[in-house]
Image: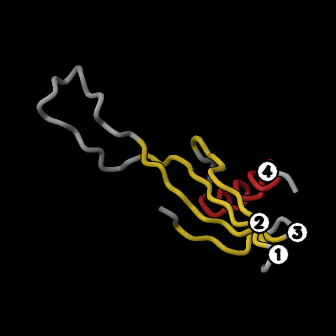
Amino acid sequence: MNLRSLYQAAKKELEALNGGEFVDFRLEQAERNDKDNLWEIVVSYLVENKNPVVNRSLSPLSMSDVHKYNRIYKSVKIDDNMEVVGLRIFS
């Protein structure tokens, strides 16, 4: 089992649930749980921010504080057959 395989398994499963490709999908953490024969990983990706915060004191030409995307973190459990068996929001 390698990190690339874990990354690909998580991305494939989450994109299928989400209905599309993610922006900036990352493998943040991977740890083997030998007791349960699982990999516990944390992944993150960007989603478009539907309600960006705008600092009205800035000029219209300087909107650098508008956050166009939010980073979402998920904890994913993957078994030895590379199947996703658990998922939760992680912060």
Of the residues shown, which amino acid type is indicated by label 3? Asn
Q: Is label 3 in contact with label 2 (beta carbons under 8 Å)? A: no
Badge 4: residue crowd in 10 Å (few <14, some 14–19, many ≥20)? few
According to the picture, the residue beneath numbered tag 2 turns out to be 32
3 or 4: tag closer to the N-terminus: 4
Residue 76 appears left or right of 9: left
Q: Nearer the viewer, mark 2 or mark 4?
A: 2
- Where's the N terminus, which quadrant? bottom right
Of the residues shown, which amino acid type is indicated by label 2? Arg
According to the picture, the residue beneath numbered tag 4 turns out to be 3
Of the residues shown, which amino acid type is indicated by label 1? Asn
According to the picture, the residue beneath numbered tag 1 turns out to be 37
Q: Point out residue 37 in the picture as x, y percentages from the top left corner.
A: 82, 75
Residue 15 appears left or right of 64: right
Task: Report the number of discs.
Answer: 4
Q: Nearer the viewer, mark 3 or mark 4?
A: 4
4 or 1: tag closer to the N-terminus: 4
Badge 2: residue crowd in 10 Å (few <14, some 14–19, many ≥20)? some
Cα distance in 3D space between marks 3 and 4: 14 Å
Taking depth in this image into account, of 16 and 39 the one nearest to the observer is: 39
Taking depth in this image into account, of 13 and 76 the one nearest to the observer is: 76
3 or 2: tag closer to the N-terminus: 2
Cα distance in 3D space between marks 4 and 1: 16 Å
Taking depth in this image into account, of 91 and 85 the one nearest to the observer is: 91
Residue 79 appears left or right of 58: right
2 or 4: tag closer to the N-terminus: 4
Residue sitting farthest toward the bottom: 36
Q: Nearer the viewer, mark 3 or mark 1?
A: 1
Residue 34 sits in which quadrant?
bottom right
Q: Point out residue 26 in the picture as x, y percentages from the top left corner.
A: 63, 46
SS label for mark 2: strand
Image disc number at residue 81: 3
